[in-house]
Image (cartoon, rainbow, N blue to C red):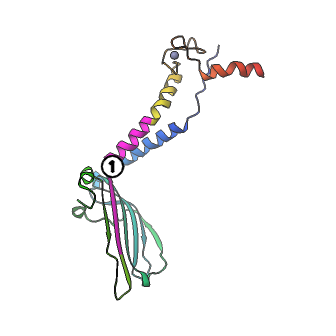
Amino acid sequence: MSADRTLPRRPLREWLSSALIALALLFLLLWLATLFRGFATNLYTEVLVPKDSYTSHQRAIAASRGRLWFAYVRAEVIEQSAPHAKKTRFWYSILPRDDEVSRYNGPGWLAWLGIDWKWKDTSSVGAQGHYVYQELFFCVPYWLLITLTGGIGWWIGRGPRLVRRRINRGLCVACGYDVRATPDRCPECGHVPVGARDAAPANASS
Ligand SMILES: [Zn+2]
Protein backbone atom coordinates (compact mmCIF):
# COMPACT_ATOMS: atom_id res chain seq x y z
CA MET A 1 0.00 0.00 0.00
CA SER A 2 1.83 3.09 -1.21
CA ALA A 3 0.45 6.44 -0.24
CA ASP A 4 0.20 9.00 -2.96
CA ARG A 5 2.94 11.35 -1.79
CA THR A 6 2.82 13.70 -4.77
CA LEU A 7 1.58 17.13 -3.78
CA PRO A 8 -1.14 18.79 -5.81
CA ARG A 9 0.06 21.45 -8.21
CA ARG A 10 0.09 24.91 -6.72
CA PRO A 11 -3.31 26.40 -7.49
CA LEU A 12 -3.56 29.92 -8.88
CA ARG A 13 -4.98 31.07 -5.55
CA GLU A 14 -1.80 30.05 -3.78
CA TRP A 15 0.40 31.92 -6.25
CA LEU A 16 -1.80 34.99 -5.93
CA SER A 17 -1.63 34.70 -2.16
CA SER A 18 2.18 34.55 -2.23
CA ALA A 19 2.36 37.52 -4.62
CA LEU A 20 0.10 39.62 -2.39
CA ILE A 21 2.10 38.76 0.72
CA ALA A 22 5.33 39.65 -1.12
CA LEU A 23 3.74 42.95 -2.10
CA ALA A 24 2.83 43.58 1.54
CA LEU A 25 6.48 43.02 2.52
CA LEU A 26 7.62 45.42 -0.22
CA PHE A 27 5.22 48.06 1.11
CA LEU A 28 6.59 47.44 4.60
CA LEU A 29 10.16 48.04 3.38
CA LEU A 30 9.12 51.23 1.57
CA TRP A 31 7.31 52.38 4.69
CA LEU A 32 10.43 51.87 6.79
CA ALA A 33 12.45 53.71 4.14
CA THR A 34 10.19 56.75 4.38
CA LEU A 35 10.55 56.73 8.17
CA PHE A 36 14.32 56.90 7.87
CA ARG A 37 14.56 59.42 5.08
CA GLY A 38 11.70 61.51 6.33
CA PHE A 39 11.33 63.44 3.11
CA ALA A 40 9.86 62.73 -0.30
CA THR A 41 11.70 59.95 -2.07
CA ASN A 42 10.61 59.31 -5.61
CA LEU A 43 10.51 55.71 -6.69
CA TYR A 44 9.92 56.61 -10.27
CA THR A 45 9.65 59.85 -12.19
CA GLU A 46 8.96 60.40 -15.83
CA VAL A 47 9.96 63.86 -17.00
CA LEU A 48 9.08 65.27 -20.37
CA VAL A 49 10.90 68.53 -20.94
CA PRO A 50 11.91 69.32 -24.52
CA LYS A 51 14.37 72.13 -25.20
CA ASP A 52 13.23 75.57 -26.35
CA SER A 53 9.67 74.86 -25.47
CA TYR A 54 7.65 75.70 -22.44
CA THR A 55 6.49 72.22 -21.75
CA SER A 56 6.82 70.04 -18.72
CA HIS A 57 5.07 66.76 -18.04
CA GLN A 58 5.99 64.94 -14.90
CA ARG A 59 4.63 61.76 -13.48
CA ALA A 60 5.90 60.22 -10.31
CA ILE A 61 5.39 57.48 -7.79
CA ALA A 62 6.84 58.51 -4.48
CA ALA A 63 7.25 57.40 -0.91
CA SER A 64 6.90 60.10 1.66
CA ARG A 65 5.62 60.58 5.20
CA GLY A 66 4.47 57.00 5.55
CA ARG A 67 2.42 57.19 2.40
CA LEU A 68 2.63 56.12 -1.20
CA TRP A 69 2.13 58.97 -3.65
CA PHE A 70 1.09 59.30 -7.22
CA ALA A 71 1.85 62.67 -8.72
CA TYR A 72 1.22 64.29 -12.06
CA VAL A 73 2.20 67.80 -13.04
CA ARG A 74 1.68 69.33 -16.46
CA ALA A 75 2.73 72.83 -17.46
CA GLU A 76 2.44 73.64 -21.09
CA VAL A 77 1.70 76.34 -23.62
CA ILE A 78 -0.14 74.39 -26.30
CA GLU A 79 1.01 76.60 -29.18
CA GLN A 80 4.67 76.25 -28.22
CA SER A 81 4.55 72.60 -27.32
CA ALA A 82 7.04 70.34 -29.02
CA PRO A 83 7.45 66.56 -29.24
CA HIS A 84 8.50 65.29 -25.85
CA ALA A 85 11.73 63.62 -24.95
CA LYS A 86 11.00 61.08 -22.25
CA LYS A 87 13.41 60.74 -19.39
CA THR A 88 13.06 58.47 -16.44
CA ARG A 89 14.62 59.63 -13.22
CA PHE A 90 14.83 57.81 -9.97
CA TRP A 91 15.35 59.51 -6.63
CA TYR A 92 14.14 62.81 -7.98
CA SER A 93 11.33 64.56 -6.23
CA ILE A 94 8.48 66.58 -7.69
CA LEU A 95 6.36 66.37 -4.58
CA PRO A 96 5.61 69.50 -2.58
CA ARG A 97 7.65 70.07 0.54
CA ASP A 98 6.66 68.26 3.70
CA ASP A 99 5.07 71.31 5.30
CA GLU A 100 2.87 71.82 2.25
CA VAL A 101 1.47 68.33 1.97
CA SER A 102 -0.23 67.98 5.33
CA ARG A 103 -3.70 68.52 3.92
CA TYR A 104 -5.24 68.42 0.44
CA ASN A 105 -8.78 68.24 -0.89
CA GLY A 106 -9.97 64.80 0.20
CA PRO A 107 -12.83 64.58 2.70
CA GLY A 108 -11.78 65.00 6.31
CA TRP A 109 -12.36 61.44 7.48
CA LEU A 110 -10.34 59.99 4.58
CA ALA A 111 -7.55 62.50 5.14
CA TRP A 112 -7.54 61.51 8.80
CA LEU A 113 -6.86 57.94 7.66
CA GLY A 114 -4.06 59.18 5.40
CA ILE A 115 -5.88 59.04 2.07
CA ASP A 116 -5.86 62.41 0.40
CA TRP A 117 -5.70 63.99 -3.02
CA LYS A 118 -5.30 67.28 -4.78
CA TRP A 119 -6.51 68.31 -8.18
CA LYS A 120 -5.59 71.73 -9.47
CA ASP A 121 -6.29 73.05 -12.92
CA THR A 122 -5.49 76.71 -13.59
CA SER A 123 -5.44 76.46 -17.36
CA SER A 124 -6.15 79.73 -19.15
CA VAL A 125 -5.95 81.50 -22.48
CA GLY A 126 -3.50 84.41 -22.50
CA ALA A 127 -1.30 86.40 -24.86
CA GLN A 128 1.09 83.46 -25.24
CA GLY A 129 -1.68 81.05 -26.15
CA HIS A 130 -3.38 78.25 -24.27
CA TYR A 131 -1.56 77.90 -21.01
CA VAL A 132 -2.20 74.61 -19.25
CA TYR A 133 -1.23 74.03 -15.66
CA GLN A 134 -2.51 70.89 -13.99
CA GLU A 135 -1.53 69.13 -10.80
CA LEU A 136 -2.80 65.83 -9.52
CA PHE A 137 -1.61 64.27 -6.29
CA PHE A 138 -2.98 61.19 -4.64
CA CYS A 139 -1.67 59.46 -1.55
CA VAL A 140 -2.44 56.23 0.31
CA PRO A 141 -0.94 55.29 3.68
CA TYR A 142 1.32 52.24 3.79
CA TRP A 143 -0.44 50.74 6.80
CA LEU A 144 -3.59 50.48 4.68
CA LEU A 145 -1.75 48.96 1.70
CA ILE A 146 0.05 46.48 3.96
CA THR A 147 -3.17 45.52 5.75
CA LEU A 148 -5.08 45.05 2.48
CA THR A 149 -2.46 43.13 0.48
CA GLY A 150 -1.22 41.09 3.45
CA GLY A 151 -4.71 40.40 4.77
CA ILE A 152 -6.21 39.39 1.42
CA GLY A 153 -3.08 37.37 0.59
CA TRP A 154 -3.28 35.47 3.87
CA TRP A 155 -7.05 34.98 3.56
CA ILE A 156 -7.11 33.48 0.06
CA GLY A 157 -4.02 31.35 0.70
CA ARG A 158 -4.97 29.78 4.01
CA GLY A 159 -7.06 26.98 2.44
CA PRO A 160 -4.41 25.71 0.00
CA ARG A 161 -1.70 26.09 2.67
CA LEU A 162 -3.69 24.01 5.15
CA VAL A 163 -4.20 21.23 2.57
CA ARG A 164 -0.47 21.23 1.72
CA ARG A 165 0.52 21.12 5.38
CA ARG A 166 -1.80 18.19 6.08
CA ILE A 167 -0.59 16.22 3.06
CA ASN A 168 3.05 16.84 4.04
CA ARG A 169 2.41 15.50 7.54
CA GLY A 170 0.37 12.51 6.38
CA LEU A 171 -2.85 13.86 7.85
CA CYS A 172 -6.34 13.64 6.42
CA VAL A 173 -6.95 16.61 4.14
CA ALA A 174 -10.55 16.91 5.29
CA CYS A 175 -10.31 16.59 9.08
CA GLY A 176 -6.60 16.50 10.03
CA TYR A 177 -6.67 12.95 11.46
CA ASP A 178 -3.41 10.97 11.18
CA VAL A 179 -3.90 8.69 8.11
CA ARG A 180 -0.29 7.49 7.64
CA ALA A 181 -1.45 3.93 8.44
CA THR A 182 -4.59 4.18 6.31
CA PRO A 183 -3.74 6.48 3.37
CA ASP A 184 -6.61 5.22 1.15
CA ARG A 185 -9.43 6.18 3.47
CA CYS A 186 -9.64 8.28 6.59
CA PRO A 187 -10.99 6.17 9.50
CA GLU A 188 -12.11 9.28 11.32
CA CYS A 189 -14.27 11.02 8.69
CA GLY A 190 -14.32 8.60 5.75
CA HIS A 191 -12.55 10.97 3.37
CA VAL A 192 -10.95 9.24 0.37
CA PRO A 193 -7.95 11.17 -1.08
CA VAL A 194 -8.16 12.09 -4.76
CA GLY A 195 -5.00 10.07 -5.48
CA ALA A 196 -6.44 6.88 -3.92
CA ARG A 197 -9.81 7.36 -5.64
CA ASP A 198 -8.25 7.76 -9.14
CA ALA A 199 -5.64 5.02 -8.74
CA ALA A 200 -7.98 1.99 -8.92
CA PRO A 201 -9.92 2.74 -12.16
CA ALA A 202 -6.79 4.05 -13.88
CA ASN A 203 -4.89 0.81 -13.15
CA ALA A 204 -7.85 -1.36 -14.18
CA SER A 205 -8.34 0.28 -17.57
CA SER A 206 -4.66 0.22 -18.59
ZN1 LIG B 1 -10.62 12.61 7.85
Q: Is residue 5 magenta?
A: no
Pick the front one: 132 or 31 = 132
Q: Residues within 10 Å of mark 1 (few under 14, many from 20)?
A: many
Q: Quadrant of the C terminus?
A: top right
Q: Position of residue 79 (x, y in %)?
A: 43, 84
Question: Residue 95 vs residue 164: left or right?
Answer: left
Residue 190 lies, with reference to residue 97, above or below; the image says above
Q: Position of residue 26 (x, y in %)?
A: 40, 47
Question: Residue 111 vs residue 158: left or right?
Answer: left
Residue ID at (27%, 55%): 65
Q: Secondary structure at mark 1?
A: helix
Residue 81 lies, with reference to residue 45, above or below; the image says below
Residue ID at (59%, 33%): 9
Residue ID at (63%, 22%): 195
Dividing the picture into quadrants, the one containing residue 107 is bottom left
Q: How many marks?
A: 1
Q: Quadrant of the N terminus?
A: top right
Residue at far bottom of view: 127
Residue at far right of view: 206
Q: Which residue is mark 1?
A: 142
Residue 203 lies, with reference to residue 133, above or below; the image says above
Q: Main secondary structure of the magenta part?
A: helix
Dividing the picture into quadrants, the one containing residue 77 is bottom left
Residue at far left of view: 99
Q: Position of residue 116 (x, y in %)?
A: 29, 57
Dividing the picture into quadrants, the one containing residue 95 is bottom left
Q: Is residue 151 magenta?
A: yes
Residue ID at (47%, 39%): 17
Boundaries of the magenta span: 133-155
The yes-or-no answer for disc 1 within 8 Å of ligand 1 is: no
Q: Position of residue 143 (x, y in %)?
A: 31, 46
| Three-letter amino acid code at the position of disc 1 | Tyr
